[in-house]
Amino acid sequence: MTLLLEMRGITKMFPGVRALDNVNLRVAEGEIHAVVGENGAGKSTLMKVLSGVYPAGSYEGEIHFAGELAEFQTIRDSEAKGIIIIHQELALVPLLSIAENLFLGNEIARHGIIQWNEVNRQARALLAKVGITDQPETRVEKLGVGKQQLVEIAKALAKNVRLLILDEPTAALSESDSAALLDLMLELKSQGVTQIIISHKLNEVRRVADSLTVLRDGGTVSTMSAKAGEITEDRIVRDMVGRDMAQRYPPRTRRAGAPLLEVRNWSVQHPDFPDRQSIRDVTFDVRDGEVVGIAGLMGAGRTELAMSIFGRSYGGATQGTVRMRGKEVSVATVSDAIKAGLAYVTEDRKALGLILEEPIQRNITLANLGAVAQRGLLNEGQETQVAEGYRRSMNIRTPSVMQKVVNLSGGNQQKVVLSKWLFAGPDVLILDEPTRGIDVGAKFEIYGLINDLSAQGKGVVIISSEMPELLGMCDRIYVMNEGAFMGCLTAEEASQERIMSMIVSNMETV
Amino acid sequence: MADATETAPTGQRMLDYLSNHLREYGLLVALIVVMVFFQITTNGTLLRPVNLTNLLLQNSYIVIMALGMLIVIVAGHIDLSVGSVMGFVGALAAVLIVTMDVPIIVTCAICIVMGGMIGAAQGYWIAYWRIPSFIVTLAGMLVFRGLSLWLLQGQSLGPFPREFQVISTGFIADPFPAGWGQALAGMFGERNINVLALLTGIVAAALIVWLGVKKRIANRVYNVPEEPFAFFVLRNAVVVVALVFVTYKLASFRGLPNVLLTMGILTIFYAFITEKTVLGRQLYAVGGNEKAAKLSGIKTERLTFMAFVNMGVLAAIAGLVFAARLNTATPRAGFALELDVIAAAFIGGASMSGGVGRIVGAVVGALLMGVLNNGMSIMGIGIDYQQMIKGLVLLAAVIFDVYNKSKKA
């Protein structure tokens, strides 16, 4: 086994913080190496050191790549050696074609004139490698997230990649797209491309990784090898959080009372095509103290359903009724929905949930400013008290509630969004992917919070693409596909297999 | 000096605070530096009572419009039409008063309602149809420029009756016995002192200090990180000295101009609305992240619409002030003025992307531009250089903002 990459004793200081502390990473030629760790463990920093974002000299330690000492000054230097990173946020230009994106910054040109025939020929070959059948002239915006991810990989292949680094590649993908991506990773491995995958999803890591390094608090905790049978989820989780997590989901006592939220025959028009229905005749209910899940693949219409109920924030005309505690309520606007006792925690907290440049305090009170104001006049002292209360009860890690939200980690940002909606005093909370991009420790805290809410008699709806999460948390799970509900399973009945088969059975009949 | 006991490394804390609030202090310091500079280069002309009074009058309509512009920019938009709207309203006032003999009060009411309607007409497309404000107000800029030309038939129209002119050129009469003023004048060696003006300055200064102290006490109760005590004292001292100094100068000339009162009341009103009310908070939320604001139950369209209605009203008020000051309405009134107004807001710290900026900042920004204009004119610098210098000041202010932000990230 020859080593392709060895990072030795990497230490990176930021003012006042030791982001990386004597980290060692050894990646063998031709393997898939996983790097896991909680948010803030130092994974991204390590990759930035490797790729030259932090130039040589700004950190301590040595990087050896392909047998030589590497001292990259810029990303260009590392790319020239064949180290290519695909970031979580895709770096494609949506309005350009696939082919144009593939060779962006790397154009095939003679005397500055692009050789389109050659471009398209090479693009086709690259796309075939990653399994995309679309034409190279197709605009990237027309592709789904899954395919865009594949285009990114094809782009890396166009640059003669030797070490491909994928940062949370499946974070935004559906299960089937994720599976396809993981297959592609294995395929590339068989062609000799060494890869590093950074991921929170341990089952995926287990599937593809030959070896694995766990980072915690900026240091290397352990390295495991698949061959030796060392990679188990329990071990990874234990090393990541530094303690045994016998249970990833806190135990909950189930109690379902009277019907709280009832949605009857809910149909929603597609926003752009009025003759199409995005949501078709959905009926469901949530009882006092109940945690209800909505399972489905990406694009099944779960977010659209939730947003259409929450003040018609999605789609055109709606049909059907919404009742709260037996009484029909209007949800025509967001403030109507809030007044009716609904809260919706969006899946896209940065774009839809938070005002990043404003302090924590102002984000928390935003949905219920009336409660910290008298006759339209804000009482900032009272506001601070409210925010301080949530900082303590939600364990938001920050020096002050006047801190801008943009400076918080993903888990703490999510706690701010949750605080905002708790302060609005809802009866039913709809949580859309509440733990996406959040580390294991924060996840556990949020699960605990969900249980507390249900113990207080509130209804909770969880929309999640992570089936274990739904199975671990929910009393009942509705299965959704192509805008309609396929059925409902109780906690006892539900299993990943049954949910998948419900989704698939529908696909066959349609 | 209770602060010193709170945390040990006071120096570090002060540095941190300074780097977080560099923009606000920077603006104040810039204004003072520029004033001192021109005071020296113009051999003391800048701060002569006559010139100071003139400076305020000259810039009043820019300050008034900058208030509205700041709100529009905070909401995430821009209004290019304000210069034209201002000119149009001035023309309308001239036609109503000079040609049609409509009473002044009625004219003012009509003009302000007209401003609101103009703002509503533009805001409607921007808020409810989501047409970019740049385009809608660019169209408005052309339309209202054309309308004023049409209304005035390409001619200047004037003069206005005296009762209308006083909007801009009048001064508030001193209600105190003349003996008081003369006694004070004797003490300071001036010819006359307007007691009301001086008293207003002193009261305003005391009010600012009192509010600041109250805020500090509240902050301490709720444990909000606060301005280091030394900065607080220094900043307040500067503001108090400046206020008293300016009002003293005004008092030794003709007292408080009517426009200053209008400007002051409007500034306080809008500062209050933006910083202390639910409405203001929601406005910043809309500019900061419109989608998140909407999903938090804020009626984002209505707020955007209202921001433009408000801008129209303020442009109308500015139009009245401008016409009264010039004592005539001309088709070119307010030409390219929108650029000065927008520049004032950005110099004052507003952000192009919305959600950031303060009323006080915009006012200081406008005054900074005003002092530059005035000082350079007195020095006899040509209009060519003046334009270049103003452009560079605007660029420098925004570069400073961006640099500050990137340094923190």
Image (cartoon, coloured by chain):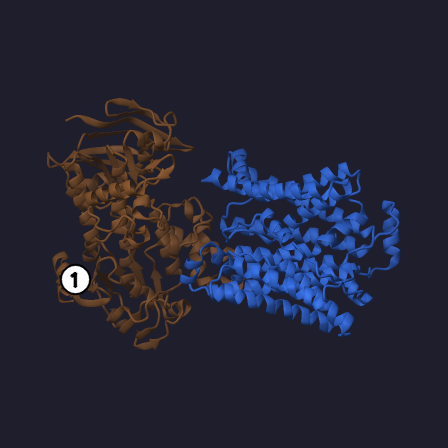
Q: Quadrant of the N terminus of chain B?
A: top right
Residue that lies at the very extreme toward the top in this rendered image: A68
Name chain B's colour.
blue
Query: Residue A58 placed where, x, y %?
Result: 39, 27
Residue placed at 68% from the left, 49% from the top? Answer: B367
What is the quadrant of residue A472 in the picture? bottom left
Please, is residue A237 above or below residue A264 in the view? above
Residue placed at 80% from the left, 42% from the top? Answer: B45
Camera-side residue of B233 and B114: B114
Q: Quadrant of the C terminus of chain B?
A: top left
Chain of the residue under label 1:
A
Question: Horizontal placement of A29 versus A398: left or right?
Answer: left
Residue under circle 1? A503
Name chain A's colour.
brown
Please, is residue B315 above or below residue A29 in the view? below
Camera-side residue of B10 and A76: A76
What is the quadrant of residue B169 in the picture? bottom right
Query: Residue A407 placed where, x, y %?
Result: 41, 44
Camera-side residue of A430 and B119: B119
Question: Horizontal placement of A328 versus A474: left or right?
Answer: right
Residue B73: tell me if it is visible. yes
- At label 1, the amino acid type is Ile
